[in-house]
Image: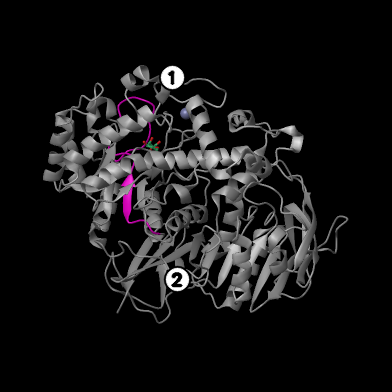
Amino acid sequence: MKQADRIYYGGDYNPDQWDENTIAEDMRLFKKAGINLLTLPVFAWAKLEPDEGVYDFAWLDRIIDQIWANGIYVCLATPTTAQPAWLSTRYPEVLPVDIQGRKRTHGMRVFFCVNSLKYRERAAAIAEEFAKRYAHHPALAMWHVSNEYGTYCYCDNCQAKFRLWLRRRYGSVAGLNEKWHTSFWGRTVTSFEEVTLPTERNDDYRFNPAIQLDYMRFVTDSTAECFMNEYRVLKKYNPEIPVQTNMSGFIKKLDQFTLTKYMDVVGWDNYPWPHHPPYFVAMKHDIMRGLKGGQSFVLTEQSPNQQNWQPYNKLKRPGEVRMLSYQAMAHGADTCLFFQMRQSIAGQEKFHGAIISHAGHEHTRVFRESEQLGCELEQLGDVFIGARSPAKVAILMDWNSWWALEQSSGPSKDMDYLDALSRYYRPFHERSIPVDFVNPGADTDYSGYALVVAPMLYMTREGVAERLTEYVREGGRLVTTVMSGLVDENDRCVFGEYPGKLRDVLGVWVEEVDALRPDESNRIHLTGALPMKQESYGCNFLCDLLHTRGAEALAVYEEDFYAGMPCVTRNRFGKGEAYYVGTQPEHAFLTELMGLICVDAGISGLFPAEEGVEITRRVSEKGEVIFVLNHNRTGAAEVDFGASRLTDLLHGGTVTGKRQIAAQDVLICRTEA
Ligand code: GLA
Ligand code: ZN
């Protein structure tokens, strides 16, 4: 597959909105800013196919040639996210039906039924026009299919297809009734035709969660088919060009492990909220890198400045975009792309930030910063393209489990899987310990990891618990928590004691789970088995009432009727050990505990550094690149490189020993051979 020889820098450009003079001026500005790739024409379906089967590509031919004449590559986007009005009008089946049963009207984007055969036919047809014309164009760096999939549709066609999907999955109605446990509340069906879509799920817990779970799987599969519908066409004309789609931020509603299975490369749009701490953003990048087993990814979009769709659209502070950009690359991005190049004159996103603002010239803070970044990226060349990020720690992440956990009625309404993951990710991030995110399966290979952490692994699909047990028996270390091991893939509780199939390896059994109100808390008291700084720490949210059965109690509750019962345990099992954290402890506890386990497992951070500094490493046959980011808004921070000798790739010179990094600054270096 075609490999990039530079960090692609640029992003969404919509020449269909601009006249020739503006486009010519844009070319000058792009070159000035070091832009080397433009993503287009994401929303131009109506212009390219003004009527069914009638194509007008002449303007796009011209613009692509013009872009290439200026030495800029293109990421060509099939424009299938926003179907033309004639398509919606002539074939209403392409328009979705929402969960309230309302047939939606034309006018939005990402607003089509992923199962509409007419939609798929027209999408494949225009993809074919693209492939025929441009698959061998020298400017073509990669394909971009559609834009931010994510429509849930409840039309009759989706209903019919869902029934077929269920038939394939369960074989018989009896099988379905059993797996969905429909005897609860007498929801038994006598034929697949009686299955309806989970429209009553909408905020009403009284709908069987198993149906919703399968519907989410079905929508994921249907969306993947929709992607593949175009992927196949594009590949047919030139298999060398990588194909991806930009996934919306970090979306819960599509299982991204499944969605990306057949993509050449993962693409994702990073729009952090102002209150998201750096570790939370870092975690999302790591999850995206985990989707294809550690393969580097395409940062398809981020904003060069403010958003328009947040309630309060804060400006990115000076230097902030540069930090966010390097953070993405530090965690596996090979590109630095933005939405958008030129701010649109009107429409829904006219106040969204852009490299070229409404002012129309280069004399702006944002343009100057983009230019500086462009210049730096050019200097970095291809030094980390395709590089991987070796890690000794794996955090398990499962979309199905996420869905099931958060839709479960009880024990608490405040289930937040990402929050749980981030609480366990943060201690590693603080110590610059690299982490991989892994989707647990029956044959997942954990042998490269010294530690596997499974926060709230509510659902253990077939073989998952067995595999983890095996890993510990062979000498691995496992940490898991409250709300783990409870259900199978149909959200049926694993019968017998909690936490289901994980109880042997953990050496505990959980008798009950207490859900605390937001204003309530408990404390956990250390038994003395661990050398912790404090005798006790706070905890809240959920408290397991558990019994040890072979495991040793590391901490017990201090309060309530279960005071004195264990809440944190360690079980030596085979050659390894398994920890269970039966509550949600405060950060101080978790970070110390993870620190101790890491010392024990021989896992250490990349380099010691002061608080607020993030350090990562990417490795390829070209060498090893170290990223150091000081996220502190004020004050330089020290990093100790010890005896290592590194070359500063942005400023030149050797880096060794102790080094100060200015606030909001980065250091990118390569280890000397
Ligand atoms: C998404 C879309 C873009 C744009 C940006 C900014 O990521 O893909 O087209 O709308 O958001 O809001
Ligand atoms: Zn539909």
- Report the mark closest to the observer, 1 or 2: 1
Query: Alpha-carbon distance for marks 1 and 2?
Result: 56 Å
Q: Is residue 633 visible?
A: no
The answer to whether 341 is drawn above or below residue 549 in the figure is above
Residue at image position (77%, 57%) is: 496
Q: Is residue 652 left or right of residue 321?
A: left
**Figure label count:** 2
- Residue 445 relative to residue 299: left or right: right
Q: Which residue is mark 2?
A: 639
Give the residue at mark 1.
Answer: 105
Q: Is residue 59 visible?
A: yes
Write the residue at 59% across / 66% down. Answer: 467
In depth, the one of 672 and 567 nearer the eye is 567
Label 1 residue near ligand 2, CB within 8 Å: no
The residue lying at 42 percent from left, 23 percent from top is 93
Neighbour class for label 2 at 10 Å: few (<14), some, many (≥20)?
A: many
The image quarter containing residue 578 is bottom right
Queried whether the magenta region covers residue 114, the answer comes back as: no
Residue 305 position, x and y percent, is 38, 41
Q: Please report the bounds of the magenta region as a residue range.
A: 332-355
Res. 287 mark: none
Instruction: Of the two numbered discs 1 and 2 on the same chain, state the one appearing first in sequence.
Output: 1
Query: In the rendered view of the protein, which quadrant contains the N terminus?
Result: bottom left
Near-viewer residue (173 or 35): 173
Q: Ligand 1 quadrant? A: top left
Q: Amino acid at mark 1?
A: Thr
Which residue extends farthest bottom? 643
